[in-house]
Amino acid sequence: MRLTPFAAMMIIAVLLIGGVASAAPEKDPLRPRVPADQMEGAKKLSTPLFKDSRQAPAKMLEEGKALYEGKGTCFNCHGKAGKGDGVAGAMLDPGPRNFANCDFHAKKTDGELFWVMKNGIQGTGMMALTPMVVTEEEAWKTIAYLRTFCKS
Ligand code: HEC
């Protein structure tokens, strides 16, 4: 079969788009990221701001959103709607967490997520962001906000 230049270009375009769309998927979102020997302590991490991040007041969620989309830079990797589809995230393997996944939220405690903010996840693009990028208080607020991406 002979290809016209146009057909050849279309095939290349489809391959390229396919390549971007199939950027590395996130990996085992339900598996703990806190090492086993630190899990007990991580689960106990807490804040005076709220007892449960899912009950954070609206004002705090607004602050969390501003941090997520601004100073915290989270959206670059996790995407504005939290689906793990941020522009910078497309280059990462494993891919960033999809916060729209309610199973993820059901599985992970606030303390574990805060531990990740302080320690990062070794060998991945998720670096320790607290206190270098956001303070502890700000980290709790972004955690409260990212809980809201689960809609059910
Ligand atoms: C440079 C890209 C990048 C940025 C910026 C980033 N993350 Fe991540 N994040 C990742 C990646 C990649 C993973 C998944 C790592 C893995 O699968 O182990 C992840 C995972 C997570 C997790 C999941 C932890 C778990 O237990 O599964 C949380 C929570 C998180 N990020 C919060 C944030 C918050 C909040 C911000 C902003 C303050 C942020 N991230 C900014 C790349 C990023």
Image: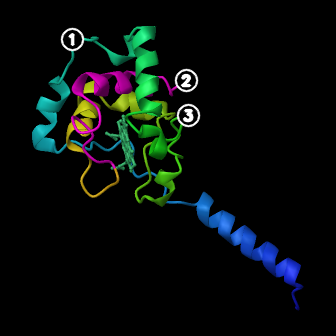
Mark 1 → mark 3, Cα distance in angstroms: 27 Å
In this picture, is 46 found above or below 108?
A: above
Instruction: Locate residue 69 relative to residue 132 in the image: left or right.
Output: right
Q: Secondary structure at mark 3?
A: loop
Q: Earlier in the sequence, mark 3 or mark 2?
A: 3
> 51 or 85, which is in the foreground?
85
In this picture, is 77 found above or below 101?
A: below
> 93 or 104, which is in the foreground?
93
Instruction: Ligand 1: give its quadrant.
Output: top left
Q: What's the residue type where badge 2 is placed?
A: Lys
Mark 3 → mark 2, Cα distance in angstroms: 11 Å
Q: Is 136 one of the magenta-colored residues?
A: yes
Q: Earlier in the sequence, mark 1 or mark 3?
A: 1
Say which residue label 2 marks.
151
Task: Determine the image quadrant of residue 80.
Answer: top right
User: Residue sitting at 17 percent across and 45 percent down?
Assistant: 35
Foreground: disc 3 or disc 2: 3
Say which residue label 3 marks.
81
Q: Which residues are magenta?
A: 126-152
Pointers 1 and 3 in contact (CB under 8 A)?
A: no
Residue 48 tag number: 1
